[in-house]
Amino acid sequence: MPDALAVARLARLREALAAAPFDAYLATASDNVHYATGYRSVGASVWPTHRMAALITGDDLWLVCPVADSAPAVDAGVPADRIIGFGTFYFEGAEGTPLDGMAGRYPRFDEALAVALSRLPAGARVGRDDADALMVGVRSVKLPGEVELLRYAARATETAIHTAIDSARAGSTEREIAAVVSASMAAAGLEPRFVVVTSGERSALADAYPTDRPWNPGELLRFDVGGTYHGYWSDLGRTAVLGEPDAEQAALYEAVLAAEDEQLALIRPGVPANRVFDVAIERVRGAGVRYRRHHAGHCIGLLLYEPPIISPGEEAPLEEGMTMCIEPPYYRLGWGGMMVEDTIVVTADGCDLLSVSDRSLRVVEA
């Protein structure tokens, strides 16, 4: 049977559909299909050409997917008689089940989708997630169960980062430190998706893979790490220094952390996203730092980046129940970079941190 969160998500979607100017909704983005059906496809996460769809009505739900997805979808709780598979794939033992004979029945996605659409009443109006904002509105405010998955993902990720910092020493390579992060995340049930661990001058590279470069005394070590837990993302940033920080490192980190603190203090329902951006930029620049950013945070959920983005042109007001990452990082080529990034949920009168670990500049004995 579908789990309680999948049932709650579908109920919320149907509530929005009931107020929409159409009778059915077609979701084709894999994350939207996951939201509606409870099925998270491995194929969709690794193949850019993977295609699938969910057709939702007030009282029915159809999943159109490659035949290879059919048995895993049933395992996830999708009724087998509501799956329309396309392509060719064989599951032995399907004889006598609704999956029997599915292989090769509909060679292409569009043929299978046409079958699903034919199940609608004549003249039914269909909304689509590639042209309508319904799904964005439904997903922007998280259900309590979604918040708990995001909370777990955030805390497991920050634990992994601090475990790696605790194990790091002079001469530890970026790759060795990243391996500790990944192992800790995996042990907690997360799928590591990006593990950015960069040291010294490389810490200025915003998104870069770890290398065999060793961490040397006096250098910064920057972490930007994300993974998924039951499809829900984490995205956390922390910074360490090997030995006591010099005056510039200490001052810059103080400015970055203060900027995040001001963002957190400002967040509440009704505050425009661009104002949360402005306070971060103003605080860092107020410390005498040349500071330019295209964003200073983003919402997070089944996607790493969900709207609204905390950016200069985004006037959308924050809403209670939104979950977002708050981040004012600093990157200077030839010198280094630092960041502090945390996940929060917007509450009725402010926000709560889902990540709760030490946000200070971590000092590791040289």
Image (spheres, grey):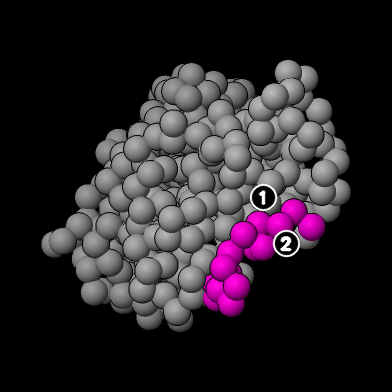
Q: Residue at x 21, y 66 (%)?
A: 268
Give me the C-alpha separation between circle 2 and circle 1.
10 Å
Of circles 2 and 1, the one toward us is: 2
Name the element at disc 1: strand
Vertical order, 255 against 157 (above or below): below
The residue under label 1 is which amino acid type?
Val
> Which residue has dot 1 on it?
64
Q: Which mark is residue 9?
A: none
Verify whether residue 350 appears in magenta: no
**Image position of 210 (left or right of 10):** right
Vertical order, 151 against 324 (above or below): above
Range of residues picked out in magenta: 111-128
Q: In this rendering, does residue 341 appear at all?
A: yes
Residue 248 rendering spot, x and y as whole percentages: 42, 53
Q: Residue at x 51, y 46 (%)?
A: 37
**Image position of 215 (left or right of 8):** right
The residue under label 2 is which amino acid type?
Ala
